[in-house]
Image (cartoon, rainbow, N blue to C red):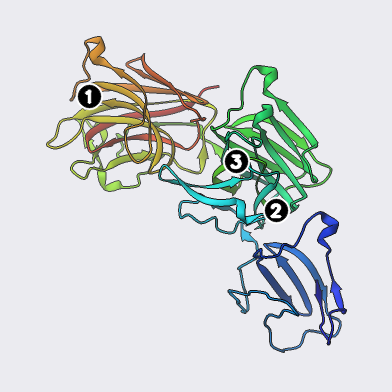
Amino acid sequence: MLGHYEGGWNNRLDEVDWDDVGSSINVSEQYLLHLSIDGDTATLSVNGLPVVSGTYGTGIASGTAGVAAYNAETLFDDLEIATEVTTGTSVPFPYMEDFDDGVADNFYYNNAFVWNEINVSGEKVLRGNTSYNTELATAYVPVAGLPQAFDISAKVKSLYVGQGWQNAFLIFDYKGENDFKYAGMFTGQNEWFIGHYQGNWNNRLSEVDWDDTGRTIYANRYYNLRVHLDGATATLDVGDELITSATFASDVNVGPVGVAAERAFVWIDDFKVTSPPTVLDSIFEDFDDQLADDLSSPNSSLWNFVDQGGSDFTYTADSNPTNNTAKQLTDPNYILPGAFSTSVSLRMNTAAGSWLDGFIIFDYQNENDFKYAGAFAGQNQWVIGHYEGHWGNKVAITDWDDQSMTIDAGTFYDLELFVDGDTATLHVGGSEVVSATFNEQVNGGRIGFGAHNALTDFDDFAYSAIV
């Protein structure tokens, strides 16, 4: 409520009874209050959402400001009074949160006790868990300056833990825990939905049952969910595959936005609110102009253009003896289609103390999370794997010892990788050598090439979508 205390609490300019919207003000729960004063108008926001507002006819004088409680035991903390206080207000568009610092900045919750930032194999994610009860869990971010059309995206995993349901949703047009729009998955029902939550999930504007096409939404697998909002229309993509769309009665391209689950255990990562991304079209780099226009490196000191004769340049990674991984990667502002191919020629060179390796990199999320396909020549193996701070997670291996063949140092090999959803297949010299199916889609992130603790030449890097 908002009012004028004059020896009593009855002079109220505005009030909202949360009983009317199915919400509750809970004892012993922390709330973030933000009061904005503009002239004679005051607006109170709670956990980032405007709740009450009113204009004082008698004006707001220049008296002091502070906090108060009546006949109550109330804890106050972090009081800030200034010309502009951003805490408790909307964050500017665009917004991105990867949780790597262990903090979900600017997130608010309907039930903070069921959300935590956790470490999973060196990568931090936001975990929501109501699998042990019947509660709804929402986590939302108030975002200001949203354009007419924008995207909400995240990596989402619904986990099976032997109890509860299995579901996960991106949410938008959030007005409260009993009124928001949603798009996502009921894993247990094998269905994708877009709808309007009003105390339950029954108001579904669109649904797609993968039972009808013999497909499965798997528990314990990450899915890259993207909701595109444009006016009143919401479109759900999964791994850049169009799943379904729905048009509401009024515009839904408004915040707050976030994630939700009910009676479920979920992991959320790489939550973003951004302009609609551009799909990467095609790339070809022969490096003869000593430029890599479409690529960049986290550590450019590990790379040099080397003339192989006749102005034929390679882009050479020298990460020995630093025991580092030299990487060249595409622009993170582009997304990849559901299926694509990428290729490069590489030559592994002997050097004191170095390894012999070289890889195509794909589904690059960060320095400790990417997929790779290439050669460990010292082991005479072609591999496809998942780098998680180490090279031990080799998902598929072809050992040329078994075929009486050798991967030779000083020899160029033409590698081409085909990615389609959750499957990656590596060809060498035009022939398939190894293939792997992951437990998640791997056509996201960035692509490129690299080598670890090695002296490796790269040439003729290419990428194209498969349509």
> Front-most of 134 and 291?
134
Q: Name the residue carrying label 3.
A: 265
Query: Is 281 placed left or right of 347 in the picture?
Result: right
Q: Name the residue carrying label 2.
A: 255
Query: Is 320 placed left or right of 80 in the picture?
Result: left
Up-down: is 166 above or below 341?
below
**Mark 1 residue type:** Gln
**Mark 2 residue type:** Gly
Q: Name the residue carrying label 1.
A: 379
C-alpha span from label 3 to label 2? 24 Å
Which quadrant would residue 209 be assigned to in this image? top right
C-alpha span from label 1 to label 3? 40 Å
Which quadrant would residue 405 be assigned to in this image? top left
Q: Residue furthest left?
A: 352
Mark 1 or mark 3, earlier in chain: 3
Q: Quadrant of the C terminus?
A: top right
Q: Quadrant of the N terminus?
A: bottom right
Mark 1 or mark 2, earlier in chain: 2
Q: Position of residue 411 (x, y in %)?
A: 21, 22
- Residue shown at the point (43%, 28%) measured from the top left: 463
Q: Which callout, 1 or 3, points to the residue nearer the camera?
A: 3
Q: Is residue 320 in view from this perspective?
A: yes
